[in-house]
Amino acid sequence: QITTSGSSPSARYSHSAVLYDGDQMIIFGGYDSGGSVNDVHSLDLSSNAWSQITTSGSSPVARYSHSAVLYNGDQMIIFGGDDGSFSGGTRNDTHSLDLSSDRWTKINTTSGSYPAVRQMHSVVVYGGDQMIIFGGLGSSGNLNDVQSLSDLDTMCGCTACAVGTYAASTGSSTCTNCAAGEYTANTGSTAASDCYRLPSGQPTGVPSAQPSGVPSGQPSSQPSQPSGQPS
């Protein structure tokens, strides 16, 4: 068991958690002794210290049995769940918390049909900007459908930056270069943490493949021996 410090969240179940910035476990919502909640807490895994995150923007209603994924390095996307009203409380709304600014935004789709309301479903991010939803418990029983929320880059206001750069903030109109020796592959990146370290000596940008069995920077063949000399 890990001994923690700081202001611990209330005891709860059916909450969500994502890993942010390498060492921050972010939890949202759930159901505690007073009912469903919509608070956000962070556990710094390097120091084991809890802190509550004060958010701004349009917060989601309290809920539990929802899903959460980390998108683009600093966007926590939540979907669905149950608000605890026990009468039509199952939901199908989508919200994003920008963890770089702690601001909530409701995501409104511009085309297609919303998935049916559900809780206890599963969600993954695929292809950089698609959220894939499967199953769960709906208003009329168990579900086994697969739904996709596409184009999260546009819905979250992410700038499409070139490989090797990232948008300094959500909705930014400019792109920032990764540090020397780092690159990004996702053109919707909105945080410096999306830049990845390259092997030593490689320039900024996606590294090119090396010939099989040849270390980076080494010649592909050995020089030939002079005629008549032992090999």
Image (cartoon, helix red, strand yellow):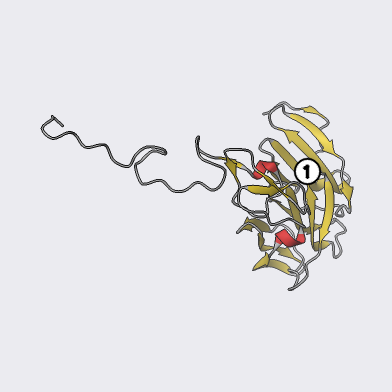
Question: In this rendering, would 200 be left or right of 44?
Answer: left
Q: Position of residue 40 (x, y in %)?
A: 82, 43
Q: How many numbered badges does the structure rendering display? A: 1
Report helix, strand or loop for mark 1: loop
**Which of 103/229 is in front?**
229
**Compared to 141, does 25 lie above or below?**
above
Q: Amino acid at mark 1?
A: Ser
Q: Position of residue 28 (x, y in %)?
A: 79, 46
Q: Position of residue 10 (x, y in %)?
A: 83, 38
Quadrant location, the C terminus: top left
Q: Which residue is mark 1?
A: 100
Residue at 77%, 66% (x, y): give it: 117
Note whether residue 66 is visible.
no
The quadrant holding residue 51 is top right
Residue at 63%, 38% (x, y): give it: 179
Quadrant location, the N terminus: top right
